[in-house]
Amino acid sequence: MTQTDKLYIDNTDEKASAAIDMVDAFLDGKDLDRKKKIHLRLLAEETVGMVKAMTGDFEAFFWMEEDSGDYRVKLNLKTEMDREKKEELLSLSTTGENTAAKGFMGRLREVIENSLLDFDNTLKLQQQNEANVGYNYMGMGVVGDASMAGTPIVWSLAGYKQTLEDGEEAWDELERSIVASLAKDVTIGIRSNVVDMTILAR
């Protein structure tokens, strides 16, 4: 397996540019056709763009790896922000909601942020009322037994797709999403205040 350095990134343009430069250098050393390189770069850009849109105090490490021809974009995040702080920020909004959580990557970012802020509630995702849209979105792709204390929760794009029907708004978002179209799968593993996201490229 080969991989880039694990680069610390935040929501600044400087760190975002450094991450993409690192990916470009990594891909330049691989025997890949131009189309594959473009697709991998797009996945990296979408991931870094998601981090740029995140709010609050968090630490994030970004890298890309290759193993037997499989390429993965990796992201590891942890936060010191709690749910009370986030609710204070959202209270400044007219609707009290995160208006940026639109589109597939926006919703995915909301899943990650909420999971980091309150792991105990995340463990109850499978029992949540379906009217709770924010958690329901993630709950539709959760695998594993959420009732076991200490067991990490895993959300997957493949599992989420299986729950959707043609014509649903969320399905339309998937069809328009660069990540959903270029990735074999996206998985999010959650344990305590740490989230690991892996995008497996097609």
Image (tube, helix red, strand yellow):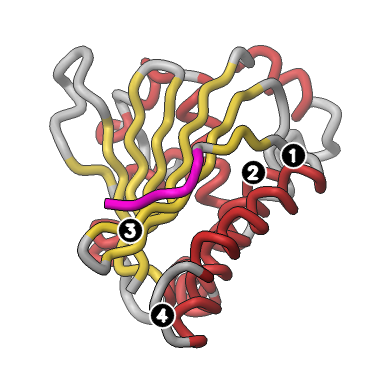
Q: Which numbered dot is residue 32? A: 4
Q: Is residue 3 magenta-colored?
A: yes
Magenta residues (range):
1-5
Q: Is residue 41 magenta-colored?
A: no
Return the disc, 4 or 2, that comes first in the chain's sequence. Answer: 4
Which of the 4 image quadrants contains residue 129? top left
Determine which residue is flagged by label 2.
Answer: 51
Above-or-below relation of 52 to 167: above
Using residue 170 as the reference point, say whether residue 14 is left or right of it: right
Residue type for callout 2: Val
Q: Is mark 2 on a helix, strand or loop?
A: helix
Is residue 196 shown to the viewer in this render?
yes
Q: Which numbered dot is residue 19? A: none
Mark 2–mark 1 Cα distance, whole angstroms, equals: 6 Å
Measuring 74% from the left and 39% from the top, which residue is drawn there? 11
Determine which residue is flagged by label 1.
Answer: 11
Neighbour class for label 1 at 10 Å: few (<14), some, many (≥20)?
some
